[in-house]
Amino acid sequence: MKLQWFMTCKNIFIYFSFIILFCTNLIAIDNTLSKTEQNQIELINLTPEEREFLIKTKINCVVSTDWIPFNFIENDKLSGISLDYWDLIKKKTLIESICTGVPSLKNSYELLKNKKADIILSSSISENNITYGMFSLPYASYPLAIATTNDKRYISDISILNGKKVALGTTNTIFNLLKNKYPQINFMQVNNNLQALRQLSRDEVFAVIDVLPVLSQAIVDYGFKNIKISGTTEFNFDLRIMVRNDYKRLLPIINKGIIAIKKEEVQEIKKRWFSAKVEKVVELQYLWETISIIIFFIFILFYRQLILNKHNKKLQQANDKIEQKSFELQKKTQELIKQKMLFEKIYYESADGIIILKAEDKTIIDCNQSAYKLLEYETKTEFIIEDIANFFPEYQPDKFHSNERFNEMIELAIKKGSNFVEWVHKTKTGKNLWFEVVITSIEINNENILHMVWRNIDNRKKIEQKLNELTHNLEEKIEKEIKKNEEKTNQLMQQSRLAQMGEMISMIAHQWRQPLTAISATANNMLIRFMIDEKMNKETIQDELTLISNYSQHLSSTIDDFRNFFKTDKKKVETTIESIIEDSISILNNSLISNDISLYKDYQCNRKLILNSTEINQVILNLIKNAEDALIENKIESAKIQIKTFCDKDTIYIEISDNAKGIPDNIINKIFDPYFSTKSEKDGTGLGLYMSKIIINDHCQGNIGVKSSSLGTTFTIKMPIINH
């Protein structure tokens, strides 16, 4: 009787505990299901032994917290895809468990191996861990994805990675699987996917392989904008629950829970983690149906409800964040697609011809429509099979062999990265056309690829040729005009000198008048004395003849001054500017004295210079003579001319001033123009100042300027100092 009573109490306790667990988990399920999208969760059938095991055993589960989005910690709570599946399994089987987070999967295995944990939520079968654990059916399966940088093409076959470095941030099981399947790929196992993605971002590896959700989530979370998912492998990663090997009854319970998961529930989890937002609604239908059974537990359930509400709220916030990240990822993916479409449009619809070549053997890989149209080919197929050497004439216009020069162009492009050249091409019909060619070297899969851009510049080259011919003809015309201008300038200079010659003859006649009169008087005096037979002693005759000789030498000196002034030799000599000025003054001195004009000199330079003294003499003489004429014409009392010289390190200055009341404002800007003169009534030629400006500005590389006021005029000459 005691044994029967004990068994009856035991069964009542078991069934009562089962009802409590059922009601508790049923309420938790109510708070996470949508009113419109979720079906009611149904309990699975368990054997009495299985129910007894669950009642007696509280399952201690562990999860690694370093595997986003399967297992991780968010807001100090465990979260992830594996936790969502485990919640479904618990609700279907009424398993009571406490899950604890550990830093890594390795820690999880240690705890299970030492019987400090009962199950590991997310694991995979391997030779190492099968000795101390049992594995459930896969509750989720995801493909192994391949990530590359944005500049890589989509990978349709994993064999494309042969010979390249590929980082794996996954488990040893996947590493060994891929290593054995593809021995030609250089797989590198790293500590975590962050390290793998960093190496990929820095181009230290060609690709990264990991489980698709893990890889896509890591790319978004860590902000790798230059990385994309480029394809998937043929392998899937199965998520299983690992059970300690002495819990034989627990494994079939878990498998029953996994089998009972409906497609709608799987889709709900996928939506929650990968796409749309799932709104959580709390329905209290089952609460009212079961209130009569669990009324004495109402306070406990109420407290639990509050905890679950907080959890659901945080879960909702996490879902919102994931949805936002998913939206951003989708937006970035759309942008990448748009960029790809844009690049393809630019490539295929560009007006410039684009050709892709292998650098090694010069074979054509691809081209756009403009490329073969430019060379008058009908189809892309017939263009690509051509040897690129057939697109050039045998020799270029510069007489270089086309093939040899083309090889040099490619070598330079590979060395420098790019090269630019203007090149003659031959069309299919044999017509030669000029093209502007840009060659860029690109390394793809350890192979040099040449990107060539052709632009037709044949019309431009023809215009350039015509322009060169016009330029050549224009240069000949300019040269002829310069010669004509030089001839005119020489004529003007000669005309100016002839005009000054007339003035000089007048001045010489004026200077000769006094000496000739004195010679005539002395000769007449001696003649009269001879006629009257007046005896003259030897000394008197010698004095008279000496006087005649001195006057004759003065006349000869005047002739020398005249001759030196009109020398046409333009050879430069070493002299001083003061010496040149003195030569000019010697010619005009008697004229100045006779017109009662005072001459003041202030010499402050006195440096030996290399000068064309004849031309500068002409300028100085012209300026002094103009000043003399102005003083006489304006009838200036106390008339004076001042000549001043000074110099600095690089320049010599000459200033010639007068007090002849200045030049009127309305003509001062014209005085250097040819044939402009204020002496028209006196037969002025208007060439003196014009030729003076040409001599100083052009022949001496200097400058001549004028300043005038009501007091008088100052001409300033600036010339560079040349000592050699």
Image (cartoon, rainbow, N blue to C red):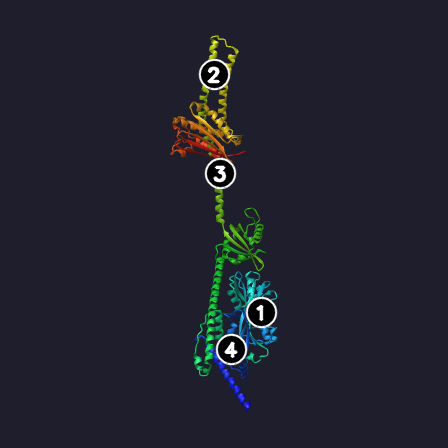
Whether 300 is drawn above or below 1: the answer is above
Mark 4 closeness class: few <14, some 14–19, many ≥20 residues within 10 Å: some
Secondary element at image label 4: helix
Q: Which of marks 3 and 1 is nearer the N terminus?
A: 1
**In front: mark 3 or mark 1?**
1
Q: Which of marks 2 and 4 is nearer the N terminus?
A: 4
x, y percent for residue 299:
46, 79
- Residue 637: quarter of image: top left
Looking at the image, which is closer to me, 12 or 264? 12
Secondary element at image label 3: helix
Instruction: Quarter of the image for the N terminus: give it.
Output: bottom right
Q: Which residue type carries mark 3? A: Glu
Whether 671 is drawn above or below 349: the answer is above
Q: Which of marks 1 and 2 is nearer the N terminus?
A: 1
**In front: mark 4 or mark 3?**
4
Q: Which residue type carries mark 4? A: Lys
Mark 1 closeness class: few <14, some 14–19, many ≥20 residues within 10 Å: some
Q: Which residue type carries mark 2? A: Ile
Mark 2 closeness class: few <14, some 14–19, many ≥20 residues within 10 Å: some
**In front: mark 3 or mark 2?**
2
Q: Distance between the residues labelled 3 and 2?
A: 61 Å
* The label number, if any, that marks residue 519 in the structure image: 2
* The label number, if any, that marks residue 171 in the structure image: 1
- Residue position for label 3: 476
Q: Distance between the residues labelled 4 and 1?
A: 27 Å
Looking at the image, which is closer to me, 351 or 412? 412
- Residue position for label 4: 90
